[in-house]
């Protein structure tokens, strides 16, 4: 993810189904680690998109 951020990617999601965690990488922000989320709101970069994780996690 660090390489993606270096290249200018503004949002990255690293989904770990084994540990039921999602790491949220946003450009110029601290990494956010979510435990067992049911959905990820991708606002403000994708204001109308919410990633449903109920079948993944």
Image (cartoon, helix red, strand yellow):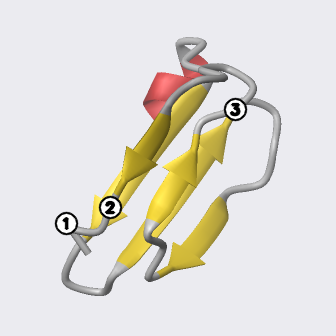
Left/right placement of residue 56 relative to residue 12 reads left
- Determine crowd level at label 3: few under 14, some 14-19, many 20+ residues with C-alpha closer than 10 A: few
Q: Report if residue 27 is visible in the image.
A: yes
Q: In which quadrant of the rendered view does residue 19 lie? A: bottom left
Residue 1 appears in view: no
Mark 2: which secondary structure? Answer: loop
For the point 41% across and 76% down, the residue is 21
Q: Which quadrant of the structure image shows residue 30?
A: bottom right
Going from the N terminus, do you reach mark 1 or mark 3 first?
3
Contact (CB < 8 A) between labels 3 and 2? no
How many marks on residues? 3
Mark 1 touches mark 3? (CB < 8 Å): no
Give the percent coordinates (x, y) of residue 4: 46, 25
Task: State the CA–CA distance, disc 3 to disc 2.
Answer: 16 Å
Q: Does label 3 or label 2 sit earlier along the sequence?
A: 3
Rendering coords of residue 36 (x, y %): 44, 82
The disc at residue 43 is 3
Mark 2 vs 1: CB contact within 8 A: yes
* Residue at the (67%, 57%) spot, across then down: 31
Q: Residue, x 69% and y 32% (percent of image)?
A: 43
User: Disc 2 and disc 1: Cα gap in Å?
Assistant: 5 Å
* Distance Cα–Cα, label 1 vs label 3: 20 Å
Q: Which residue lies furthest to the front in this view?
A: 48
Q: Where is mark 2, residue-wise?
A: 53
Q: Residues within 10 Å of mark 2 (few under 14, many from 20)?
A: some
Which residue corresponds to mark 1? 56
- Quadrant where the N terminus sits is top left
Please, is residue 30 above or below residue 42 in the view?
below
User: Height in image: 45 above or below 51?
Assistant: above
The kind of secondary structure element at disc 1 is loop
Q: Is mark 3 on a helix, strand or loop?
A: loop
């Amino acid at each position: 993810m660090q390489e993606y951020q270096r290249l200018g990617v503004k949002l990255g999601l690293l989904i770990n189904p084994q540990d039921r965690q999602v790491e949220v990488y946003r450009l110029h922000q601290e990494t956010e680690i979510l435990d067992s989320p049911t959905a990820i709101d991708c606002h403000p970069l994708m204001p109308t998109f919410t990633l449903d994780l109920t079948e993944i996690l």
